[in-house]
């Protein structure tokens, strides 16, 4: 018997938001970010304003949490448009958020604080 694995649904991480037209923006995911699933925490590259996977060790702006990816995006070989939860008030399910591999507890807490400053709360 084949085992089916269910992936993340667009917006499946979201518990509540005040108004979708206010909390979400269509942004550009930078080429090379790869295939991203809904709920991936993103950073915003300072020069150019494109988004990429949160990269705590970086110094180009992507080290600061700037939003959460709403749906799937494939920026493996080229820039890709994507909808991102960029501001609140909004509440997200902390168990549905995707953090970068190898992130430390301190880096996670810093990112959570940055998202809270945007009005995005984890519960």
Image (cartoon, rainbow, N blue to C red):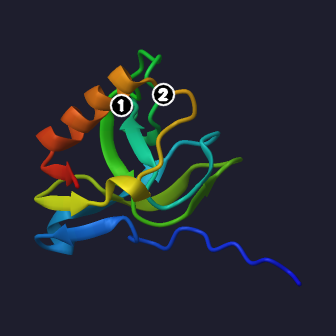
Residue ID for mark 1: 108
Residue 48: where, in percent of width, then height? 40, 34
Residue sitting at x 38%, y 70%: 11
Are the residues tagged 1 and 2 within 8 Å (C-beta)? yes
Judge whether 67 appears above or below 57 on screen.
below
Residue ID for mark 2: 103
Residue sitting at x 48%, y 27%: 103
Q: Residue furthest right?
A: 1
Residue 15: where, in percent of width, then height? 25, 69
Q: Which mark is residue 41?
A: none
Residue sitting at x 27%, y 59%: 92
Q: Secondary structure at mark 2?
A: loop
**Circle 2 Cα neighbour tier, 10 Å, few/some/many (<14 / 14–19 / ≥20):** few
Measured Cα–Cα span from mark 1 to mark 2: 7 Å
Q: Residue furthest bottom?
A: 1
Judge whether 93 appears above or below 60 on screen.
below
Q: Nearer the viewer, residue 51 or 8?
A: 8
């Amino acid at each position: 018997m084949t085992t089916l694995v269910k992936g993340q649904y667009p917006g499946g991480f979201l518990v509540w938001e005040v108004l979708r037209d206010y909390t979400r923006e269509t942004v550009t995911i930078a080429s090379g970010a790869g295939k991203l699933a809904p709920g991936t925490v993103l950073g915003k590259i300072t020069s150019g304003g494109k988004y990429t996977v949160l990269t705590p060790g970086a110094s180009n702006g992507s080290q600061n949490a700037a939003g959460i990816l709403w749906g799937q995006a494939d920026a493996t070989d080229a820039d890709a448009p994507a909808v991102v939860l960029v501001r609140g008030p909004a509440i997200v399910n902390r168990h549905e958020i995707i953090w970068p591999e190898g992130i430390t507890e301190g880096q996670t807490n810093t990112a959570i604080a940055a998202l809270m400053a945007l009005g995005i709360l984890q519960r």
